[in-house]
Amino acid sequence: MSLLQLTAILLGAAGSALGHGYVTSIDVDGTTYGGYLIDTYYYESDPPELIAWSTTATDNGYVAPTAYDDSDIVCHRGAEPGALSAEVSAGGDVTMFWNTWPSDHHGPVITYLAQCDGDCASVDKTSLEFFKIDAGGLIDNSNVPGTWATDELIAANISRTITIPSDIQSGNYVLRHEIIALHSAEALDGAQNYPQCINLKVTGSGTATPSGILGTALYKDTDPGIYVDIWNSLSTYEIPGPTLYSAGSVATGTSTATATTTTSTESSLATTTTADTEPSTTTTALATLTASADSATGTQDTDPTGLPEQTSGSPSQVTPQPEAPTVVVAPSSSTQTVAATTSVPSGQVNPHGNGGKGHSQTCKASKKRSSGISNRRRHARDISI
């Protein structure tokens, strides 16, 4: 067994001890609300009422492209509406704070709105029609795999600020905020979607009612922004989903983001959008090993045999120099909320609900793929040997 193969196996095992992230708090026009703490509230018999939707993703896992036509893609696996709504003025800001995000899980950060026909607390998620209001993709690709919206999110205290369109009609909306990790997307079904939802009550005198599309129709597994090799130099990147809506525009189709920084949360083109939030505190970077290829429903990079998962054939690639990934964790601090029922405990949140057991068990259900060479190269880039 070569050193490269051994490294890949050890790296896959180490991946079971690491996780991805979720939204732990939300700032809505200056008021802070608690997020759904999956490793805490899921196990409570009487969890607090929140604006955030609950999920059953206790393994900190993702939704795979094979499930794009399933209701889990709407607001994550087993998601149910939050009981509360946060009031925000049209043109106001919403900042989503994540607890952590792996630095090697590069990809776009996208946010949508969908109007509820009545109270969002009882909405049927399969009936929601989403229009895109914020999107960031490839920022710069001078050095493969490039700088992405996820890197900006990490730099901004693991957060992204979204501006609500100033002309939309007042009413109840679901905000769908999502990271799509592309570190394994050179393989079909290799992308990883991490959607998070909250309820909003938009106020103002706007009259616009942008058309949207169902959550189960947002993406296809063969979309150029989903099935893409970020380990080859990209001159352009097409952000998945419909075009970005801005006040006075029409949201339809898709568009392409060039590898050039563009700062705007209200642009009629789905070009790269940078975060509006400056880092409020110094983020803590933990240099550690993370696995880069995950199972279709979990977060570990091994197949049932314990060997590294194999990827399907992909276009010939230029192998970049290996990078040492880090997992960035939100600083330990107490988050003040508007009510005791929406409080966020102080200190860091364990990103592996149930002691990480769900993470490991789910990952063992991962399917094998065909090309060992592609897989070993993908794992090798996650560690400096």
Image (tube, rainbow, N blue to C red):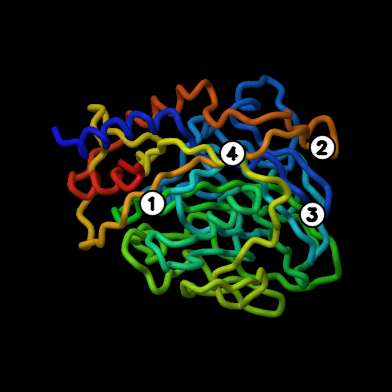
Q: Nearer the viewer, residue 385 or 372?
A: 385
Earlier-in-chain disc, 2 versus 1: 1
Which element is circle 2 on? loop
Alpha carbon distance from label 4 to label 2: 19 Å
Q: Position of residue 378 (x, y in %)?
A: 29, 48
Alpha carbon distance from label 3 to label 4: 30 Å
Q: Quadrant of residue 226?
A: bottom left
* Residue for badge 3: 201
Amino acid beneath label 1: His
Q: Residue at x 37, y 61 (%)?
A: 144
Amino acid beneath label 2: Gln
* Residue for badge 2: 336
Q: Nearer the viewer, residue 269 or 335?
A: 335
Tell me the quadrant of the picture where the C terminus can be found.
top left
Question: Mark 4 or mark 2, which is nearer to you?
Answer: 4
Earlier-in-chain disc, 3 versus 4: 3
Which element is circle 3 on? strand
Tell me the quadrant of the picture where the N terminus can be found.
top left
Alpha carbon distance from label 2 to label 1: 35 Å
Q: Residue at x 68, y 53 (%)?
A: 174
Which element is circle 4 on? strand
| 385 horizontally vs 125: left or right | left
